[in-house]
Image (cartoon, rainbow, N blue to C red):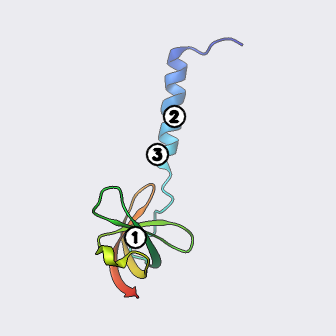
Amino acid sequence: MKKVSNVEVKKRSRKLTTLFESFGPYNGMEGKIETIWITEIATDNVHLVGHTKGYMQVLVIASEILLGTRTTVKITSVGRWSVFGKLMHSHY
């Protein structure tokens, strides 16, 4: 098999990168109300990590006392791998 030129490799790589970056799996979630289970402290030590029934990752700023609880949040912003939410109500 003939080797592909470096110029072609870079061109293909840029095309795939552009395609990958165009995907936004959580677009349209902003403003929605979701119930999540808070399971852990995020690696940034600022947010708590929760997941919806569909296992969408939601990051919230809240007290560690909420670990292991079910909570209602409003989605405030979306990222590629997770969404950010604001605590609305906790169901101890």
User: What residue type is disc 2 on?
Assistant: Lys
Q: Position of residue 15 (x, y in %)?
A: 51, 34
Q: In percent of the image, x 46 and y 76: which residue is there? A: 36
Q: Earlier in the sequence, mark 1 or mark 3?
A: 3
Give the structural element (helix, strand or loop) at label 1: loop
Q: Within the image, what quadrant is residue 49 found in?
A: bottom left
Q: Position of residue 43 (x, y in %)?
A: 35, 56
C-alpha separation, residue under disc 1 versus residue under disc 3: 19 Å
Give the structural element (helix, strand or loop) at label 2: helix
Q: Position of residue 18 (x, y in %)?
A: 47, 40
C-alpha separation, residue under disc 3 versus residue under disc 2: 10 Å
Q: Which residue is mark 2?
A: 15
C-beta proximity under 8 Å, tags 1 and 3: no
Kindly give the residue lying farthest to the top in the view shown: 2
Tell me: residue 43, above or below residue 3.
below
Q: Earlier in the sequence, mark 2 or mark 1?
A: 2
User: What residue type is disc 1 on?
Assistant: Glu
Q: Within the image, what quadrant is residue 50 found in?
A: bottom left
User: What residue type is disc 3 on?
Assistant: Glu
Image quadrant containing the C terminus: bottom left
**Foreground pick, 59 / 8:** 59
Q: Which residue is mark 1?
A: 30
